[in-house]
Amino acid sequence: MFSLLKTFITERSEASEATLNLICSHFKIVKAKRNEILVGFDEVCNGYYFINEGCLRLFTYSDDGNPITRYFGFKGGFCTALPSFIQQKSAQEYLQAIEKSELLYINHKHFFQLVDSVPQFAMIYREILEQGFINAQKRIYGFQGFDALQKVRWAIEFQPDFLMRLSNKMAASYLGISPSTLSRIKAKM
Amino acid sequence: MFSLLKTFITERSEASEATLNLICSHFKIVKAKRNEILVGFDEVCNGYYFINEGCLRLFTYSDDGNPITRYFGFKGGFCTALPSFIQQKSAQEYLQAIEKSELLYINHKHFFQLVDSVPQFAMIYREILEQGFINAQKRIYGFQGFDALQKVRWAIEFQPDFLMRLSNKMAASYLGISPSTLSRIKAKM
DNA sequence: CAAAAACGTTGACCTGGGTCAACATTTACA
DNA sequence: TGTAAATGTTGACCCAGGTCAACGTTTTTG
């Protein structure tokens, strides 16, 4: 039940088995159906999810009604509506399971108790933030500077799974191009 | 010399005067000329800058040679090529003073010594990362979903200074539109 | 397992905003 | 403070990629 989570932690910090168990004791299993919304647009996100199985995404809609995806979370990683979770304000985005998923959930209070009391967990949180920031900056540079073809090449190079694993529609909403354009580009490769 | 920095810290944590002085003792004054490059594209960024006076920007060039700005740092804030600073890899971007500036500089080693030994400073770093992450996510959503006019409106609403304070060219490279388009939009407002 | 709904593919068409160029204006620093 | 360099403005033109629609294919679920 906690083996993937323990792997995640030990890859990023030096935690004893006792510390691992202390951390894991605050998580509980949550099952989600395909397409289930875990956090709605006007809700406050109250927990952090670790993905044992399945796939989550964070998305919203632009003014003209097109979905915009900012993140996909895959098996073995953490995923939440982090701005809402940090600020405890309404999310202004959706957290959704896009497949039948098995998740480990920790609520806001326990999460920050762990951050404040377990140095290894503070380090995990720091690394999540650092990596999240670094990825976001890359995306900002990439998406201003790339045309549609370059975006697809970038996806193939740095996110090998996700063009294979996800629908064209999902991938397009992440890349900031239309599904038609993605389809046309794939046909030419 | 350290008054702005002390304000920044006390607004974000509970630090005694002694702690403030300990933190400040690791910073030294650096002067930068207008347009001076502080970190080059292939350099590793070795320090963090606090802006006492002036203005910094982080930018790179797209394949077709257009500048792309990902961040402006103004008086009273921190600014560095953070991905490079964290990973100690080449920056793949430029950190530049766009005005004659007075900066406070702390090197990588001292910075992380403070993070590891002064809880108030660890909290400052955590808040910088959290806020950086939140801003980046907003930008990702905004820049996928907005047309040129919406981007300008967004800038006026959330970054009131920066359309006034900076050249059109700079602002346009941040908004991901051409200077011509920005000029045309401003003319119609 | 069949009907319906969702998704993918492709052609025709259109437009937001980019590029280029010429000129006006502002800014920088010798 | 004068002049060269940088920036801003505006018109003309163009094209990457969006939209829409029609149709084929795959997926979902009663």
Image (cartoon, coloured by chain):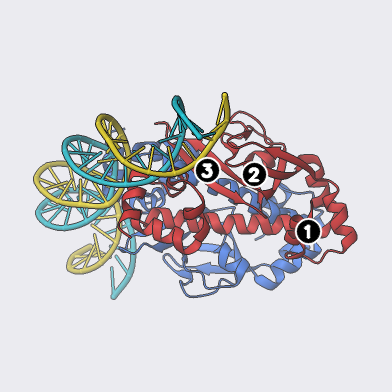
Chain colours: A blue, B red, C yellow, D cyan
Q: Is residue A176 left or right of residue C4?
A: right
Give the spatial CA distance, label 1 vs label 3.
31 Å
The kind of residue tagged 1 is Lys
- Element carrying mark 1: helix
Say yes or no: labels 3 and 2 on the same chain.
no
Q: Is residue B184 left or right of residue B118?
A: left
Tell me which chain the residue with mark 2 is part of: B
Label whose residue precedes the other's in the sequence (1 or 2): 1
Q: Residue at x 30, y 63 (%)?
A: A64
Q: Which residue is mark 2?
A: B82
Q: Residue at x 39, y 53 (%)?
A: B144
Q: Position of residue A122 (x, y in %)?
A: 75, 57
Tell me which chain the residue with mark 3 is part of: A
Give the spatial CA distance, label 1 vs label 2.
21 Å
Q: Residue at x 55, y 48 (%)?
A: B71
- Element carrying mark 3: helix
Q: Which residue is mark 1?
A: B6
